[in-house]
Amino acid sequence: MKKTRVFISALLLTAMSMSLLACSGKKEEKSAYSRELDSAVREEIHQNALNSDLLTGDKLENGVIKWLSDWDINPDSTGKNVPTDLAVFQERYGGTIKYYPCTFEERYDKLTEYISSDEGIDFFYGGNLDAFPKGAIKKMFVPVDDYIDFDSPLWEDVKDVNDTFTWNGKHYMAGVQATGDAVAVVYNRKTVAEAGLDDPAVLYENGEWTWDAFQNMLESYVDADNQKYGIDGWWFEFGLMNTTGVPPVSLENGKLVSNLADPSMERVQNWIYDLYQKGCIAIGVGDFGWETKPAYVGEGKTLFYPIGLYDFYTEKSQWTAKYGEDAFFVPMPKDPEADEYYIPTGFESYMFVSGGSNPEGVAKYLDCKRFAHIDEETKALADKQFMADYGWTQEMIDMKNNMQELAEKNPVIDLSRGVSKDCGDLINDSLRLTARGTPWNETYESVSAAVDKYLDKINSDPESADID
């Protein structure tokens, strides 16, 4: 059985707040980005879906499913075409996705409005990891068990990880896959080579990409007086914490448990503090300032920029403008004392909204997403389309697949804001402080009791807990 460790932090909240779409608050908006798959590709998808025993049932009588989000599944400004899984849904079940746009910040306000007005919004993204368990407790979402069969051949590979997300014995998240693209170490190969350093991708291939190698490269490179900076961005703290495999807060046997006192948490926090002391963290160093500067990677001024690979899910001209033509990425480095190679893990998951008009349609769409992941011919088409849309090389696809394998083997899934907004903010803000010069023992003493109080309230009386 694959090991699954689920924990509450705020890693992905920052990711999704930097949404790829600038959405309006209108009730419905037709996409302005009308792209169509090549007819031969669509026909191949059609045949694969039609001939597979994994997809069952006839075309939907009601093929429209209503999607509320700050990003569109349909073609959008990132340059993506019709996603392969959506094409499967269209071809096999005659389905379409009706997009209800909103900003990231107003998602829950809009959701509450639509539920109250009986609009029939069908599904909502769970991959931001701020919807569970609080969304289940507040009854904003309904269990998926009546619509998704996790024991079926289509879903059995992700049954274990989905079984982790249960509340009162019910599944509230329909997780299509654990994902390895939550955080990667982005760097520029030209910069690394000119500094006389080993390519992290080669170190990874040789099993040598560890905390020690990461720190050695930083110490060799950093020279703030000459604009040579180490780690930039807002992702690295939780990205490095995740490599221990030990969560700040676990969901164990249906109860929330704090792990802030775990020795692994102390160890990684002390290491991050050491990186700060040695000037390896760019933010706030010298003339760098307090704003991230991703373009410094492409300019040869910054060595490492940990960030979600979503930043590469754009047309090539967009990501090379930031990181340069020689940009590449690797997983976060391995914790040399961990029992496995853990990396930050996303959870591509979806919530069925209370009062939804077409939960059966959503279930069929998610079946199509699972099909696109496990049917080899369809997956190959998806990879080819991905490379065409975003200008990726086969080497980039291979590295992404390596990260995916690490995530699936030992998922470490962050549930940002999953407890409550206040608890999420406290964890998010406090666990970054060692990277700003505050010793871990001071942070631990100031927040541990408060975190315990949040968890104890939900564990003992979830219905009355303040979980906004």
Image (spheres, grey):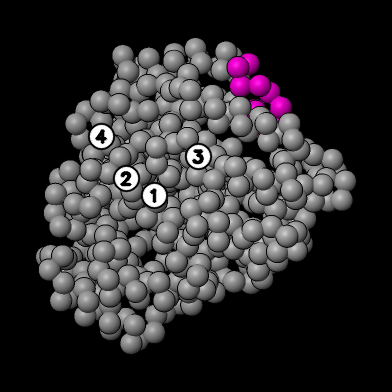
Q: Earlier in the sequence, mark 3 or mark 1?
A: 3
Q: Which residue is mark 1?
A: 407
Q: Which residue is mark 3?
A: 335
**Marks 2 and 3: which is nearer the front?**
3
**Callout 4: few (<14), some (14-19), or many (20+) C-alpha neighbours within 10 Å?**
some
Tell me, yes or no, whether the two marked residues, 3 and 1, touch with CB atoms within 8 Å.
Answer: no
Where's the N terminus, which quadrant? top left
Q: Earlier in the sequence, mark 2 or mark 3?
A: 3
Residue, x 19% and y 31% (percent of image)? 169
Amino acid at dot 3: Asp
Q: Identify which residue, 417 or 341, lies in the foreground.
A: 341
Residue, x 50% and y 39% (percent of image)? 336
Q: Is residue 385 magenta?
A: no
* Residue 54 spot, x, y in % from top left: 15, 65
Q: Earlier in the sequence, mark 2 or mark 4?
A: 4
**Callout 1: few (<14), some (14-19), or many (20+) C-alpha neighbours within 10 Å?**
many
Q: In this view of the protein, can residue 130 be seen by the observer?
A: no
124 relative position to 54: left or right = right
User: Which stretch did the figure color magenta?
Assistant: 432-442
Where's the C terminus, which quadrant? top left
Amino acid at dot 4: Thr
Tell me, yes or no, whether the two marked residues, 3 and 4, touch with CB atoms within 8 Å.
Answer: no
**Marks 2 and 4: which is nearer the front?**
4
* Residue 53 spot, x, y in % from top left: 12, 68
What SS does tag 4 mark? strand
